[in-house]
């Protein structure tokens, strides 16, 4: 067996049908120029593509975010990557679950399967290369070797850039129903949850602790997109590079309990969040993760400032 085939084997849980990656998310915003400024400041590459905006990690060709002009900020869809030889099995499964297929939304020519979750959130399953990590992502705890000063002064600070999309959190009116739907239709697995308030799910073929989270609300919408950073220092530097450009509102620095990631959330111009994340737990295809149901006070954060009172407010549903 060659190294390549070994690696492919390691990226797949044999005999299990499930999405392998969260390929990208799509939203509409009322002001693409403002979005471009926000996400560029965050450290992403925001590229004009026709009338739309694509979000890329610097130095990477994968489009993680697709923004279109709309009357207001609104969740568009989540697109999950599947293996080509799973397409027929997914179609059979969706038929068994009586899930109606939809036409792709305007401007999308993907050859994917489109449908909605029980909250009306639009989902696509499409054959894509696996973009989720194949192992726990590198995380630098030590900034410099012995004999070298790690910190060189604030004037020498350079912009930090996320390495990839980590996950997206969407709102649901019923966390139980959403977990049942996503685990049945997409083959994702429950990682951990906190009562009826929030649930985190991972892909079965090697995935971070969550590629998707669902949060209790009074309607559908997107709560945040989250981006992987290489150290706590990069999370802090990201927070500062946003704050000096006027994006100081948010929540952090802190460490989550479920998923274990260090975080700093920056509020976007429309009331949802963009998260810097580092050191999230990783679930390889060989691991059966034991999902827990945790008390809210024992699930949200290990340490950090008190979250803003409106942290889980769904401004899309309120409009
Ligand atoms: Fe998150």
Image (cartoon, rainbow, N blue to C red):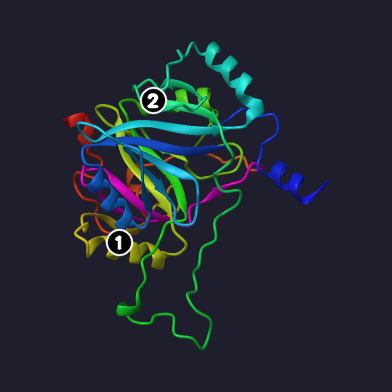
Q: Which residue is mark 1?
A: 239
- Picture quarter containing residue 58? bottom left
Above or below 58: residue 95:
above
Give the farthest residue toward the bottom.
147
| Image: magenta residue range | 262-286
The verdict on residue 283 being magenta is: yes
Q: Which residue is found at the position 34% from the left and 23% from the top?
A: 119
Image quarter (top left, top right, bottom left or bottom right) of the C terminus: top left
* Percent coordinates x, y for residue 109 in the rendering: 46, 26
Q: Which residue is found at the position 51% from the left and 51% from the top?
A: 281
The label shown at residue 122 is 2
Closer to the camera in the image, 44 or 169: 44
Please, what secondary structure does the residue beneath circle 1 have?
A: helix
Among numbered discs 2 and 1, the one appearing first in the sequence: 2
Please indicate whether residue 311 sits to the left or right of residue 126 in the image: left
Above or below 14: residue 246:
below
Q: Which residue is found at the position 55% from the left and 44% from the top?
A: 131
* Percent coordinates x, y for residue 206 in the rendering: 60, 43
């Amino acid at each position: 067996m060659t190294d390549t085939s070994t690696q492919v084997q390691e990226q797949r849980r044999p005999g299990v049908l499930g999405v392998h990656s969260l390929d990208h998310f799509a939203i509409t915003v009322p002001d693409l120029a403002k979005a471009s400024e926000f996400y560029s400041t965050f450290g992403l590459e925001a590229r004009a593509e026709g009338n739309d905006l694509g979000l890329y990690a610097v130095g990477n060709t994968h489009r993680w975010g697709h923004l279109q002009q709309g009357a207001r900020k609104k969740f568009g869809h989540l697109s999950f990557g599947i293996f080509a030889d799973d397409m027929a099995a997914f179609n059979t499964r969706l038929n068994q679950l009586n899930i109606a297929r939809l036409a792709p939304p305007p401007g999308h020519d993907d050859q994917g399967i489109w449908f909605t979750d029980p909250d009306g959130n639009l989902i696509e399953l499409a054959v894509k290369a696996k973009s989720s990590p194949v192992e726990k992502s590198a995380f630098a705890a030590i900034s410099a070797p012995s004999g070298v000063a790690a910190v060189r002064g604030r004037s020498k600070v350079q912009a930090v850039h996320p390495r990839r999309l980590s996950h997206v959190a969407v709102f649901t009116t019923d966390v139980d129903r959403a977990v049942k739907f996503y685990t049945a239709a997409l083959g994702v697995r429950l990682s951990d949850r906190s009562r009826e308030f929030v649930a985190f799910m991972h892909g079965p073929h090697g995935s971070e602790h969550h590629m998707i989270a669902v949060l209790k609300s009074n309607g559908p919408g997107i709560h945040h997109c989250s981006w992987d950073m290489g150290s706590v220092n990069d999370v802090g530097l990201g927070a500062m590079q946003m704050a000096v450009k006027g994006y100081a509102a948010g929540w952090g620095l802190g460490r989550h309990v479920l998923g274990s990631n260090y975080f700093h959330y920056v509020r976007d111009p429309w009331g949802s969040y963009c998260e810097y994340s580092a050191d999230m737990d990783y679930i390889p295809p060989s691991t059966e993760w034991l999902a827990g149901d945790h008390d809210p006070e024992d699930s949200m954060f290990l340490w950090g400032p008190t979250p803003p009172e409106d942290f889980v407010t769904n401004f899309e549903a309120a409009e």
